[in-house]
Image (tube, grey):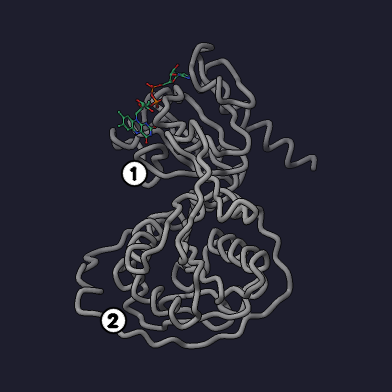
Amino acid sequence: MSVLVLVEHTDGNIKKKSFEAVQYAAEIAKKTNTTATALVLGTIADSELENLGTHGVQKVLHVADEKLNELHARAYASALIAAAQKEGSKIIIALHDINGKAVAPRVAVKLKAGLVSGALSYPDLDKGFVLKKAVFSGKAFAFVNITSDVKVITLMANSFPLAPGSGKASIERLDVTFGDKDFGIKVKSVDKVTGEVSLADAELVVSGGRGMKGPENWGLIEDLAKELGAATACSRPVADAGWRPHHEHVGQTGGTIRPNLYIAVGISGAIQHLAGVNGSKVIVVINKDPEAPFFKAANYGVVGDAMEILPKLTEAVKKFKQHK
Ligand SMILES: Cc1cc2nc3c(=O)[nH]c(=O)nc-3n(C[C@H](O)[C@H](O)[C@H](O)COP(=O)(O)OP(=O)(O)OC[C@H]3O[C@@H](n4cnc5c(N)ncnc54)[C@H](O)[C@@H]3O)c2cc1C
């Protein structure tokens, strides 16, 4: 009856947000008097798998098929179902990201399970199995009770701080018989973003909007991000215009992030943009228009020209680091 969690990795390195999901699964296991098991797919070293024990799982099931190094939603779902059946799992957890959103609904349908996508809380067991999630583009919260026997959850990243312990997980290989259609979609090419702080995992993000005027000014955003050790993001029109790559676009139709600090520069704060960032712990807005809607969602605001403020802010961060 183990709580089962799907773990993601990039080229054999477990993603930070997956450690968070593992910790979340382990905490739910504790609350429901059971154990937690992690499922890992594809090529990865045992030493990396053992690490998962430090975040609370007792066991790791590893399906070492190299075809699973790339996302195949049907195959991932088949592996998750096989693992759930092996462990007798009634609670199954994945991340609320591209992979989790593709896999969890398939698993839920196959296992006739209730699904809460984008959970922000542990289940309230006094009220049944009630989870908090954001709705209406983050304008409100819903509290959803899963009443089915099997329950599937996708967890919003950066909802809980990591607190690693010292446990070590045992590793078991799992053989899964895949169906004809499981690898029906052919991945023709993969574009990997390298050498940058990953936006999904970033604790600090500097983001630019149309107020930056053009790609030639992005050095100002990058300089500040580099000084802070932050990832860079942007509003949708900026990505649509080709000023920045699409993986940086956040909002309703882009990525959803929950960093500790989100610095929005020259972004008006449209509801569709806020939908992707309003879970950030602290929001700083830099905008020359004091009436820009983003100021209403900000913890701190600077009214002024980004072209003047950004170099000064970068310089101030540099000086602050020197005197630390
Ligand atoms: C269905 C749908 C989905 C959408 N999804 C998304 C989404 O996922 N993400 C998203 O971002 N948008 C999304 N949008 C678009 C959204 O509605 C806004 O149009 C968009 O967010 C505006 O981007 P912006 O703030 O960069 O540009 P603008 O609205 O043009 O704002 C630019 C801001 O920069 C300020 N500014 C100008 N010059 C300076 C300066 N020198 N210094 C400082 N500030 C300056 C201005 O005062 C202004 O507030 C969506 C829209 C629709 C209809």
Q: Residues within 10 Å of mark 1 (few under 14, many from 20)?
A: some
Which residue shows up at 37% across the image and 73% down it?
69
**Label 2 near ligand 1 (CB < 8 Å):** no
Give the image location of residue 168, x and y in percent. Answer: 67, 80
Which element is circle 2 on?
loop
Q: Is residue 228 above or below residue 96?
A: above
The image quadrant where one finds ligand 1 is top left
> Which mark is drawn over residue 246?
1
Which residue shows up at 62% across the image and 63% down it?
28
22 or 132, nearer to the observer: 132
Which element is circle 1 on?
helix
Placement of the C terminus among the 4 image quadrants: top right
Which residue shows up at 67% across the image and 68% down it?
30
The residue where tag 2 is placed is: 178
Q: Amino acid at mark 1?
A: His
Residue 243 at least partly seen = yes
Residue 197 at least partly seen = no
Looking at this rendering, what residue extends furthest in the right direction?
324
Give the image location of residue 3, x and y in percent. Answer: 55, 71
Q: Amino acid at mark 2?
A: Phe
Q: Earlier in the sequence, mark 2 or mark 1?
A: 2
Which residue shows up at 50% across the image and 74% down it?
89
